[in-house]
Image (cartoon, rainbow, N blue to C red):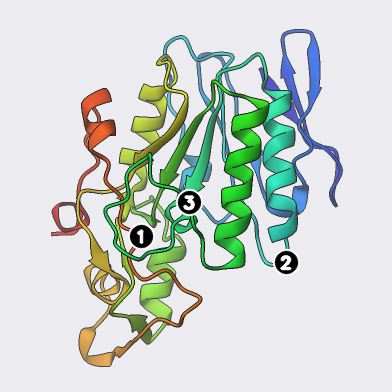
């Protein structure tokens, strides 16, 4: 399986599976790339994501695309449509759709898979709608909800924020996950029949302020601040189901960065 990108703009990309050419309708501006080599899993992720360049040999996954459809600035309205298009294109393939913890309201944290999404901002609403459309178009798909991703070979968005920003929320709690752990967990999911949502968050729940400090920011130079009403305050994830299903450990950020 391989991919073909059709120039610039928002022209469809295509997924080759054997002799079939499947239009995936992934806009180039989203920055998704579908990487596929023999006996490798394909991962479609934003250009800015640490997952973009992470791949490894995976038994029995030669025709199994793992796709993440995400939006950049100004693309929220397209997120659900893009996700549904990818799900339809992958109808005969194993599909893992990556979503976000921000589909929840953040009222209590420790969210489980059966908790009802109730996003508080446009990004969360677009991702929740994408989940619904993926589930309708591809009922067997696994919908992975994850959190802040860090720890790639090169500095990613979270590392850059810690280096460049000075104001961080002390009352917004997340479950950051190391990119290698997340990628290994996704690859382990490929041969499994796990339809519907699955939470893949790291074992430690931390504030955005503490996360920045763990990533190397000097706390003496930071300004603690509080989140606005359009930010979900506590979207920590309960990933106990994943721990039961998978051998891959989703380590806590304190263990990874100690």
> Closer to us: mark 3 or mark 1?
3
Where does label 2 land, which residue?
Answer: 74
Q: Earlier in the sequence, mark 3 or mark 2?
A: 2
Q: Residues within 10 Å of mark 1 (few under 14, many from 20)?
A: many
Q: Is 103 located above or below residue 134 in the figure?
A: below
Please identify the quarter of the rendering in which residue 29 is found.
Answer: bottom right
* Along the viewing direction, whichever of 225 and 2 lies nearer the viewer: 225
Where does label 1 land, which residue?
Answer: 235
Q: Residue at x 57, y 50 (%)?
A: 128
Q: Position of residue 158 (x, y in %)?
A: 40, 65
Q: Position of residue 251 (x, y in %)?
A: 20, 45
Where does label 3 land, which residue?
Answer: 117
* Along the viewing direction, whichever of 148 and 91 lies nearer the viewer: 91
> Closer to us: mark 2 or mark 1?
1
Q: Give the number of the disc on residue 94.
A: none
For the residues marked 3 and 1, what is the alpha-carbon distance in whole angstroms? 11 Å
Q: Earlier in the sequence, mark 3 or mark 1?
A: 3
Label 3: which secondary element: loop
Q: Residue at x 51, y 46 (%)?
A: 99
For the residues marked 2 and 1, what is the alpha-carbon distance in whole angstroms? 23 Å
Q: Is 22 located above or below residue 207 in the figure?
A: above
> Would you say the residues marked 3 and 2 are in contact, meaning their CB atoms lie under 8 Å apart?
no
Q: Residues within 10 Å of mark 3 (few under 14, many from 20)?
A: many
Label 1: which secondary element: loop
Q: What quarter of the picture does the N terminus occupy?
A: top right
Would you say residue 184 is visible in this rendering? yes
Please identify the quarter of the rendering in which residue 150 is found.
Answer: bottom left
């Amino acid at each position: 399986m391989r991919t073909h990108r059709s120039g610039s703009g928002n022209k469809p990309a295509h997924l080759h599976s054997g002799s079939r050419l499947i239009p995936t309708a992934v806009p180039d501006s989203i920055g998704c790339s579908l990487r596929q080599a023999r006996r490798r899993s394909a991962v479609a992720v934003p250009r800015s994501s640490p997952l973009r360049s992470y791949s490894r040999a995976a038994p029995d996954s030669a025709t199994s695309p793992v796709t993440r459809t995400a939006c950049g600035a100004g693309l929220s309205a397209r997120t659900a449509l893009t996700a549904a298009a990818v799900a339809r294109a992958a109808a005969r393939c194993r599909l893992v759709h990556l979503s976000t913890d921000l589909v929840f309201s953040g009222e209590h944290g420790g969210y489980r898979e059966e908790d009802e999404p109730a996003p508080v901002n446009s990004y969360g609403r677009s991702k929740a709608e994408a989940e619904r459309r993926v589930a309708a178009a591809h009922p067997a798909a696994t919908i992975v909800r994850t959190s802040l991703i860090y720890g790639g070979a090169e500095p990613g968005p979270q590392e850059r924020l810690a280096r460049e920003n000075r104001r961080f929320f002390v009352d917004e709690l997340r479950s950051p996950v190391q990119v290698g752990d997340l990628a290994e967990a996704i690859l382990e999911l490929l041969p499994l029949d796990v339809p519907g949502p699955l939470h893949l968050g790291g074992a430690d729940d931390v504030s955005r302020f503490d996360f920045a400090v763990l990533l190397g920011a000097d706390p003496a130079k930071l300004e603690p601040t509080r989140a606005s009403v359009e930010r979900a305050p506590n979207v920590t994830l309960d990933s106990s189901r994943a721990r039961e299903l998978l051998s891959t450990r989703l380590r806590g950020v304190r263990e990874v960065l100690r």
